[in-house]
Amino acid sequence: MKKKKQKASAPRRMRCPYCGAPVSIRQASEIYHDPTSDKELYVCNNYPKCDTYVGMHEGTRIPFGTLANGNLRSLRIRAHRKFDLVWKTGIMSREDAYRWLADMFCLGLGDAHIGMFGEYRCSRLIEECDQIMERHKRVG
């Protein structure tokens, strides 16, 4: 699957889907407590009370996906790791894996991004990837 070149853009105007507060751009170093990070994030203005944020594609103001709280971010990370194993172990090509992912959720290929998934889709993807790995006798 070819990646499209991302263009720099104006900041997105967003509201937190959990508490409704506006969202601002903040330095990732503040959130991650890593002074070496020069990345930026979209962060709920009620952070840290509301633990909601999303990263951006490098050199742009385009978010990686939708805003997510800690639980959803963890689920997305788990889902992505499981999904990546499916193609990195050679069960499918990367392109075929993304086609499978899109088909599983009746999405267009351009909409098959784990960063856009909610808890249900992430959980289903984890289950499906585990089943594929088991059928192919792979550990994941």
Image (cartoon, grey):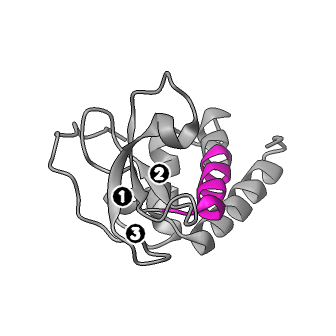
Q: Secondary structure at mark 3?
A: loop
Circle 3 is placed at which residue position?
107
Q: Amino acid at mark 1?
A: Leu
Q: Amino acid at mark 2?
A: Tyr
Circle 1 is placed at which residue position?
109
Residue 99 seen in this snapshot: no
- Which part of the image, by quadrant, shows the C terminus? top right
- Residue located 55% across and 66% down the image: 50
Q: Amino acid at mark 3?
A: Leu
Q: Is residue 113 left or right of residue 49?
A: left
Q: Say if the magenta span includes residue 32.
A: no
Q: Earlier in the sequence, mark 2 or mark 1?
A: 2
Callout 2–callout 1 Cβ contact below 8 Å: yes
Callout 1–callout 3 Cβ contact below 8 Å: yes
The numbered disc on residue 98 is: 2
Magenta-drawn segment: 68-81
